[in-house]
């Protein structure tokens, strides 16, 4: 699947029926393709014990359309009282014990439900009274735009769950191509220095695409001099930490990270496989791509959770840490963009350019003038900040618990998008958050306030 097959989000100042149909159909078909890659017998599996079984996610975005359109008055009633409710809410438990189990519907039931929702939304778009002027967050149409973006968010998170199934349960769709495993980075890993500067965090109000409540606002931050690594940390670099026994050395881990690592007996990144014998040997782990197991691609970014990223920073030492959100906005300010907020047509590994990560810095077209590779795309980038509200934050009435429940010390931020990010997720303004132990197609780059060694 190539970037020119995917469409940018609808423009708020120029909504068209054709554009809405195209964007809706595209997001829907992506989700269908993804779930068609899974053996139907595996849809009741729970690849992540802290998430519902896959069948929930197959139906969830469809239920979201119905529930939000109804809330906005764009639809007078629900579709199926039982499924509208059962499929309405995802979960974010701290531990397995907090997860409730339900009697889940069959694939046939969910497929039928989805087909009905598809027809309902298509007919709704046909019948919409489109406004002459720009649509804002107070317009009932916001519910439709919200549901379109929500589906794309779940496309990506479902892909992460499916990536955790055994390979025998999945089959790569024909048009989903992995990047080359062999290609070397196009840029030399080095430390980049950034002078002090005041930056603004938060999305300008004038931009013309859908936005989530937590993106709006303007926070001025005085960013001190700092250094950041030009490339994301690669599998080859993380292999040194692993071979040094990093997963067994308490001194590298935060208290919470060590507790997580110990409780789950984690000894390697989630998407490394065949990691035995032990780390001290010269063995080379293999790599779990989206649908297959490959030789570990040394130049692709490593994918880890926040605990593991911080442990690697401690291993590197010299006060090395993850970048802050303000620093991230500083280093990406000069990245190539289209029309200020749209990240396409620059070679970024977003929008399913590949069905995988690719070598860090592989495309010079999306390296900043300062030499920062992969400012966006490839894999999400963990930040040092926990998720926090921008000044004036107001939850959207159609989705009050989208962001607000997660402003805490348990959810860390990520920026930049991954190869699986589409729609407004593939935007410089999108702010993502997950529990520190959670897996996404996510990696990290190093930052430091101290002059780096070497
Ligand atoms: Fe959801």
Image: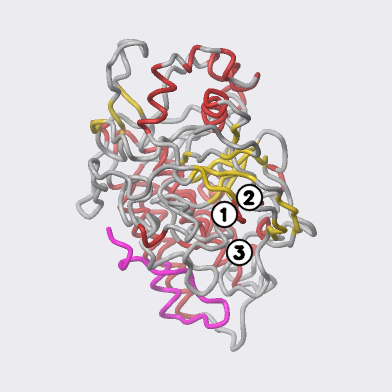
**Residue 46 seen by the camera:** no
Other-residue count near label 3 (Cα within 10 Å), few / some / many at <14 / 14–19 / ≥20:
many
Q: Residue furthest right?
A: 392
Q: Is mark 2 within 8 Å of ligand 1?
A: no
Q: Position of residue 299 (x, y in %)?
A: 33, 39
Query: Distance between the Cα atoms at labels 1 and 3?
Result: 22 Å
Number of callouts in the render? 3
- Of the residues under marks 3 and 2, which one precedes in the sequence? 3
Q: Residue at x 45, y 36 (%)?
A: 104
- Choose top left, top right, bottom left or bottom right for residue 227: top right
Q: Which residue is mark 2?
A: 327
Q: Residue at x 63, y 22 (%)?
A: 254
Do residues under tags 1 and 2 come within 8 Å of each other at their CB atoms?
yes
Q: Which residue is mark 3?
A: 211
Above or below residue 14? Residue 58 is above
Q: Position of residue 358 (x, y in %)?
A: 32, 46
């Amino acid at each position: 699947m190539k970037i020119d097959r995917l469409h940018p989000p609808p423009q708020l100042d120029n909504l068209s029926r054709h554009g809405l149909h195209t964007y809706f159909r595209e997001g829907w078909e992506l989700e269908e393709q993804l779930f068609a890659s899974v053996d139907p017998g595996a849809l009741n599996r729970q690849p992540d014990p802290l998430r519902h079984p896959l069948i929930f996610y197959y139906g969830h975005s469809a239920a979201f359309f119905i529930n939000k359109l109804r809330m906005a008055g764009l639809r007078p009633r629900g579709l199926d009282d039982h499924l509208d409710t059962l499929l309405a809410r995802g979960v974010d438990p701290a531990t397995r014990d907090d997860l409730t189990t339900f009697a889940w519907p069959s694939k046939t039931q969910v497929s039928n439900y989805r087909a009905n929702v598809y027809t309902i939304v298509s007919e709704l778009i046909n019948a919409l009274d489109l406004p002459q002027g720009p649509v804002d967050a107070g317009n009932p149409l916001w519910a439709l735009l919200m549901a379109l973006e929500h589906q794309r968010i779940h496309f990506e998170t479902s892909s992460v769950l499916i990536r955790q199934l055994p390979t025998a349960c999945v089959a790569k769709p024909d048009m989903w191509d992995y990047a080359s495993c062999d290609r070397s980075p196009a840029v030399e890993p080095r430390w980049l220095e950034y002078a002090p500067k005041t930056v603004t965090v938060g999305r300008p109000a004038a931009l013309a695409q859908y936005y989530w409540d937590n993106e709006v606002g303007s926070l001025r931050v005085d960013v001190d001099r700092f250094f950041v690594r030009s490339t994301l940390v690669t599998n080859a670099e993380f292999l040194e930490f692993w071979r040094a026994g990093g997963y067994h050395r308490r001194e590298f881990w935060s208290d919470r990270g060590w507790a997580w690592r110990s409780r789950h007996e984690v000894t390697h990144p989630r998407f490394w496989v065949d990691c035995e014998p032990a780390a001290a040997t010269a063995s080379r782990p293999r790599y779990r791509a989206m649908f297959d197991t490959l030789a570990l691609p040394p130049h692709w970014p490593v994918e880890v959770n926040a605990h593991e990223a911080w442990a690697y920073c401690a291993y590197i030492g010299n006060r090395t840490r993850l970048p802050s959100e303000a620093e991230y906005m500083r280093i990406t300010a000069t990245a190539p963009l289209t029309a200020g907020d749209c990240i396409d047509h620059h070679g970024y590994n977003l929008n399913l350019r590949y069905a995988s990560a690719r070598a860090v810095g592989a495309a010079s077209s999306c390296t900043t003038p300062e030499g920062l590779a992969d400012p966006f795309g490839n894999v999400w980038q963990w930040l040092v900040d926990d998720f926090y509200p921008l000044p004036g934050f107001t939850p959207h009435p159609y989705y009050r618990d989208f962001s607000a429940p997660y402003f805490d010390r348990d959810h860390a931020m990520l920026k930049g998008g991954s190869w699986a990010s589409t729609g407004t997720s593939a935007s410089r303004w999108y702010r993502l958050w997950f529990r520190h132990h959670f897996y996404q197609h996510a990696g990290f780059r190093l930052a430091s306030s101290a002059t780096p060694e070497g």
